[in-house]
Structures are given as structure tokens and as C-alpha cells.
Amino acid sequence: MEINLIGENTIKLQDGNDPGLVQLEVVNVPTSRYERIVAKDSLDFIVSLGGVGGLFFGISLLSLIEFMYLLLRKSV
């Protein structure tokens, strides 16, 4: 943080016990900019499907393969 003194104004007070008044003015208001770049590809879609399936249905890729194995094993 950089602080620059623009001007100074001193007023002598008659009562030495009065702490006085300090005024600060901001010359340049600090600004921040955020940029969000969203990039999705086909792999993100597959990962999202797996996450939704696992969250709501309790399905994983291994359980799907196991289910197919059991179906094929019983039919033979």
C-alpha cells in the first residue's frame, strides 16, 4: 500500500487537552477486477455425469461393470 501526502493543514487549538480532528481523503479509490474463464470439454461432461450418478444413485463405473458381468454370467 502506498500513501502519499497531498496537503497538510495545521490548526493551533487553545485547549491543549482536545485531541483534535483528523480528516483523511482518498484520492484514487482502489479497484479490483476479477475475470472468470469457464472452459468445459467432453471429459468434464463425463466426469459430471459420474458425479451425479454417484451422488444420487450410488452408481460407480465399477458397479456398472459388475452388474453387466452378472447379467452376462447368468444368461450363459
Image: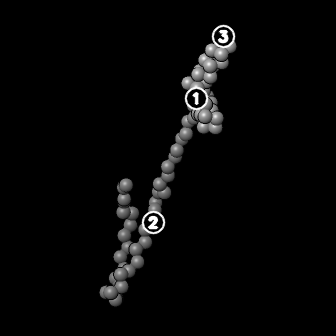
Mark 3, secondary structure of its residue: loop
Mark 3 nearby-residue class (10 Å; few <14, some 14–19, many ≥20): few
Query: Do tag 3 and tag 1 residues touch (Cβ < 8 Å)?
Result: no
Residue 48 appearing in the image: no
Q: Which mark's residue is nearer the viewer, 2 or 3?
A: 3
Residue extending farthest to the right is 75
Q: Nearer the viewer, residue 70 or 42?
A: 70
Indicate the position of residue 10 as horizontal and vertical percent values.
Answer: 35, 76
- The answer to which of marks 2 and 3 sits earlier in the sequence is 2
Residue extending farthest to the bottom is 15
Can you identify the residue that label 3 sits on? 76
Tell me if 76 is positioned left or right of 33 in this view.
right
Q: Which mark's residue is nearer the viewer, 2 or 1?
A: 1
Q: Nearer the viewer, residue 29 or 75?
A: 75
C-alpha distance separating marks 3 and 1: 25 Å
The kind of residue on which mark 1 rests is Ser
The C terminus, quarter of image: top right
Mark 2, secondary structure of its residue: loop
Residue found 68% across the figure and 13% down from its top: 75
The kind of residue on which mark 2 rests is Glu
Can you identify the residue that label 1 sits on? 60
The kind of residue on which mark 3 rests is Val
Indicate the position of residue 21 as horizontal and vertical percent values.
Answer: 40, 77
Residue found 60% across the figure and 37% down from its top: 55
C-alpha distance separating marks 2 and 3: 84 Å
Residue extending farthest to the top is 76
Residue found 39% across the figure and 63% down from its top: 6
Indicate the position of residue 57 as horizontal and vertical percent values.
Answer: 64, 35
Looking at the image, residue 14 lies above or below residue 70: below
Indicate the position of residue 29 as horizontal and vertical percent values.
Answer: 48, 57
Residue found 38% across the figure and 66% down from its top: 7
